[in-house]
Image (spheres, coloured by chain):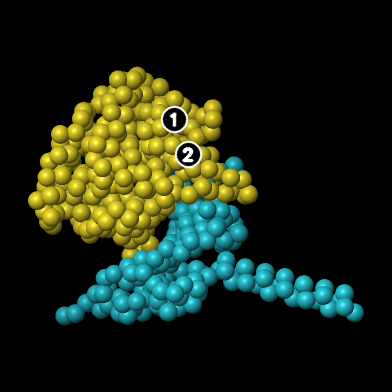
């Protein structure tokens, strides 16, 4: 088992990943704390945001496409998407985007686009690439965005249960990390008009996909013992297991 | 006379049906983490058996995921006890319809999806994923019921010395 995992992990390094560059500069509106909320996370300053150039976005797409060279990884991503269901709000139907993750990528590219943002690293993936719904990308003429900040290559925030031993830290290339981050953020964006998939929904969809595909191993909790949401970490852990053979 | 009897029967049938709908719509609320067991879940959800470590129960309006105890050293309860319940709504629930008093809730905005906020009441053991970017208002897309503060204190395994 360990040998096969090592083989899979080695094979990941041969994938056509390449590190993207950034360019352009188009600041966009910051998103205020929701009405009646006590926001404990500080809204980001978007003054430094830069739109990624075409070459970079092409590279991102290629990296995302590369994930599907691995049959298990591709099946996992498709299974997660299949597990998400249409939503109804106030008797109005909000259908899940009916397309593959690559088609969802193209949809974002044609609308809000991809952005670089120089923000502090706070989470496993969240500051590598973030998707925001506040600017209404998912409305037909909207300007929502996927934002991206690059400044960390080693995923040092991984939940300890994911590490092969208590001390070892899994390392992945920046390109691999951004491809997996893209998957995370694009799955948030399978719904329209502010009904994006929550981390909890994504974690539960990932758990079902793991069960269906026989992916096993120690996982972090979806919700921590104190009730704090840990769905984002759970989803990322499942994605890494499926796509990195770990 | 016959008409009155028929009408009464129809009304009774409607009341019984409506009552059963209310019960069906509330069933997950009666599953209490660290207290409810597989046999309670079977009765409440009307299922023949439980799947461990988690099981899914689907309805047209929402899916229920019941998580059973996985770490036997954490809680002083039997193995087939529920540890948590997730409810994912397909028909989103207006926040105000679910909870009118939010004063005991902490609110944290999701880092990477600013239009989702997590409302948590740690005393009750409830966490709500709330969509705040919908024009019609705030709607709950999923709920997690975890052990209440009282039950955490009551069933937590004491460290051995």
What chain does mark 1 sit on?
A
Horizontal arrangement in the rendering, residue B57 relative to residue A118 (left or right): right
Pick the front one: A165 or A119: A165
Quadrant occupied by the C terminus of chain B: bottom left
Q: Chain of mark 2?
A: A
Farthest left residue? A3
Which x, y percent locates residue B13?
Answer: 72, 73
For chain A, the rendered hue is yellow
Q: Position of residue A163 (x, y in %)?
A: 17, 53
The residue under the point 50% across, 73% down is B46
Q: Residue at x 33, y 55 (%)?
A: A212
Drawn colour of chain B?
Answer: cyan
Q: Which residue of the protein is positioned furthest toward the front in this rendering?
A: B2
Q: Residues within 10 Å of mark 1 (few under 14, many from 20)?
A: some
Does residue B108 show up? Answer: no
Residue holding disc 2: A97
1 and 2 marks in contact (CB < 8 Å):
yes
Q: Where in the figure is residue A223, as x and y percent of width and height?
A: 35, 60
Question: In what element is the residue under mark 1?
Answer: helix
The one nearer the camera, B104 or B16, is B16
Label 2 sits on a secondary structure element that is loop
Circle 1 residue: A107
């Amino acid at each position: 088992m360990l040998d096969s995992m090592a083989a899979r992990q080695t094979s990941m390094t041969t994938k056509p990943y390449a590190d993207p560059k950034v360019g352009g500069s188009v600041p966009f509106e910051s998103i205020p704390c929701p009405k009646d909320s006590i926001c404990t996370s500080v809204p980001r300053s978007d003054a430094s945001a830069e739109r990624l150039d075409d070459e970079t976005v092409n590279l991102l797409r290629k990296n995302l496409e590369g994930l599907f060279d691995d049959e298990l990884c591709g099946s996992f991503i498709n299974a997660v998407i299949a597990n998400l269901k249409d939503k109804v709000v106030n008797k109005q139907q909000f259908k899940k985007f009916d397309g593959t993750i690559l088609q969802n990528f193209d949809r974002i590219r044609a609308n809000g686009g991809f952005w670089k943002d120089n923000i502090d690293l706070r989470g496993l993936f969240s500051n590598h690439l973030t998707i925001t719904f506040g600017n209404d990308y998912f409305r037909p003429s909207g300007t929502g965005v996927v934002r991206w900040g690059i400044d960390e290559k080693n995923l040092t925030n991984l939940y300890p249960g994911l590490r092969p031993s208590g001390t070892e830290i899994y390392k992945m290339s920046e390109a691999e990390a951004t491809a997996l981050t893209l998957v995370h953020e694009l799955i948030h964006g399978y719904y329209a008009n502010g009904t994006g998939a929550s981390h909890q929904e994504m974690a539960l969809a990932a758990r079902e996909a793991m069960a269906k595909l026989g992916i096993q191993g120690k996982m972090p909790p979806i919700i921590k013992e104190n009730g704090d949401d840990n769905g984002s970490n759970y989803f990322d852990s499942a994605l890494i297991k499926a796509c990195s053979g770990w | 006379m016959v008409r009155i009897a028929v009408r009464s029967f129809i009304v009774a049938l409607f009341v019984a049906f409506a009552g059963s709908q209310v019960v069906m719509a509330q069933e997950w609320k009666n599953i209490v983490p660290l207290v409810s067991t597989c046999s309670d879940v079977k009765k409440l959800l009307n299922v023949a058996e439980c799947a461990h470590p988690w099981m899914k129960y689907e309805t047209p309006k929402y899916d229920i995921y019941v998580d059973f105890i996985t770490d036997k050293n954490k809680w002083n309860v039997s193995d087939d006890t529920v540890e948590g319940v997730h409810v994912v709504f397909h028909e989103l629930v207006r926040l105000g319809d679910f909870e009118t008093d939010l004063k005991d809730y902490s609110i944290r905005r999701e880092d990477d999806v600013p239009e989702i906020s997590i409302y948590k009441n740690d005393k009750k053991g409830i966490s709500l994923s709330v969509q705040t970017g919908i024009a019609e208002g705030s709607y709950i897309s999923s709920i997690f019921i975890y052990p209440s503060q009282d039950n955490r204190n009551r069933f937590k395994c004491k460290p051995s010395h």
